[in-house]
Image (cartoon, rainbow, N blue to C red):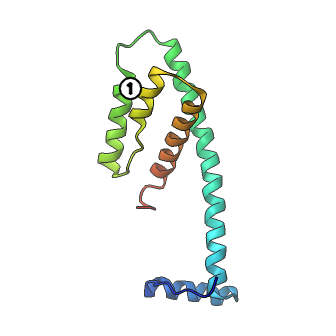
């Protein structure tokens, strides 16, 4: 693929130019290094979030199994939390309610894994709040 042009805001372009000069590498190499570092950190954060999520989820299940029935609809509480995330943080939430309804009707390992992944991804976005749009 040949050379392609891309608009970069002047302030950002100057920052890239300055860092590339400092490193003694072309600007395109600096950008490639930054992307590789971003991907590696994103993967590492995703893995850490998975174990944090797994720990919290496991504790929730243990707690629920030990508590006498609270009479509260846990799905309604979960939906309230999702609404709060949308309204208070301005973060879009995945269509978890639809998937949870499907799961309630016909539980499956595949659906559990899909829901877990969506919740983990939402947790990553919450932790990155203010960093990404």
Left or right: where does residue 130 sit relative to residue 51? left
- Judged from the image, the secondary structure of the residue bearing numbered disc 1 is helix
> Residue at coordinates 33% horizontally, 52% vertically from top-left?
90
Q: Position of residue 73 (x, y in %)?
A: 35, 20
Q: Position of residue 81 (x, y in %)?
A: 36, 36
In this rendering, the count of numbered labels is 1
Q: Position of residue 71 (x, y in %)?
A: 35, 13
Q: Position of residue 85 (x, y in %)?
A: 36, 44
The residue closer to the viewer here, 69 or 94, is: 94
127 w.r.t. 100: above or below: below
> Residue at coordinates 47% horizontally, 83% vertically from top-left?
8
The residue closer to the viewer here, 3 or 119, is: 3
The residue closer to the viewer here, 40 or 68, is: 40
Q: Quadrant of residue 23?
A: bottom right
Residue at numbered disc 1: 75
Task: Locate the N terminus and report the quarter of the image it occupies.
Answer: bottom right
């Amino acid at each position: 693929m040949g050379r392609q042009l891309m608009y970069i805001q002047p302030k950002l372009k100057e920052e890239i130019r300055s860092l590339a000069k400092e490193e003694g590498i072309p600007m395109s190499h600096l950008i490639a290094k930054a992307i590789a570092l971003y991907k590696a950190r994103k993967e590492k954060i995703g893995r850490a979030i998975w174990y944090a999520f797994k720990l919290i989820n496991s504790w929730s299940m243990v707690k629920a199994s030990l508590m006498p029935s609270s009479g509260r609809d846990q799905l309604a509480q979960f939906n309230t939390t999702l609404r709060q995330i949308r309204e208070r943080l301005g973060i879009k939430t995945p269509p978890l309610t639809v998937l949870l309804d499907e799961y309630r009707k016909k539980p499956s390992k595949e659906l559990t894994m899909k829901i877990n992944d969506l919740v983990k991804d939402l947790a990553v976005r919450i932790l990155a709040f203010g960093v990404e749009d």
